[in-house]
Amino acid sequence: MARIIGDQNQLYVADDVYTWLRIAIVGVILGMVYVGLTYLVSSFVIDPIFCRSVIDVNICSGSISVAGNVAAVLTAAIGLFALVALRASRPIIEVVGAMIILWGLAGWTEGLGWGEVLLWSALLFGLSYVLFGWVCRHAQTIPALLVVALIVAIGQFVAQL
């Protein structure tokens, strides 16, 4: 009679929901950080430099959008470090995809109350990080890149409507 001996040195993933939950939490926190950075950059960088004089009205009128784009890059850098710390698969693809698809979020939410802006930003960042994290778990890099590019193209097309 044969006896089956299990290898005790191997680690088996019982459930990867915890990983998705952590990525979602990172995305939600980054959405909140994005809102804070947007208002900080707008109040302390864009408005004091460009809105003192009435030379460039376009930048001053769209200061929240410009500040949101700067905050998107800063938030992506913070998100990259967070995903590397979580050992997520292909964190650079995930972060860049989320940054591109959420580019202009401050302009989309301009005019809403601060609670609504915080809620929508946290929700959209959380969903985008989970979506791109799910896509980036593919075993090969090229198909993951192609799917991320397709999602980003569709997302930008929908955002322009």
Image (cartoon, rainbow, N blue to C red):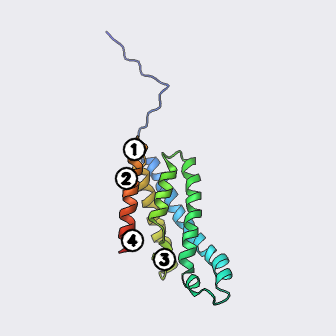
Q: Disc 2, disc 1: CB below 8 Å?
A: yes
Residue at coordinates 63% horizontally, 90% vertically from top-left?
Answer: 54
* Badge number at residue 107: 3
Q: Nearer the viewer, mark 2 or mark 1?
A: 2
Q: Residue 9, percent across and down?
A: 50, 25
Tell me which label, 2 or 1, sits earlier in the chain: 1
Q: Residue 46, percent across and down?
A: 63, 78
Tell me which label, 1 or 3, sits earlier in the chain: 3
The residue that disc 1 covers is 138
**Cα–Cα span, label 4 and label 1:** 26 Å
| Numbered disc 2: secondary structure | helix
Looking at the rendered structure, the kind of residue marked 3 is Gly
Tell me which label, 3 or 4, sits earlier in the chain: 3
**Cα–Cα span, label 1 and label 3:** 33 Å
Decide: is 137 above or below 114.
above
The residue that disc 4 covers is 159
59 sits left or right of 131 in the view: right
Residue at coordinates 48% horizontally, 72% vertically from top-left?
Answer: 104
Residue at coordinates 43% horizontally, 37% vertically from top-left?
Answer: 13
| Numbered disc 1: secondary structure | loop
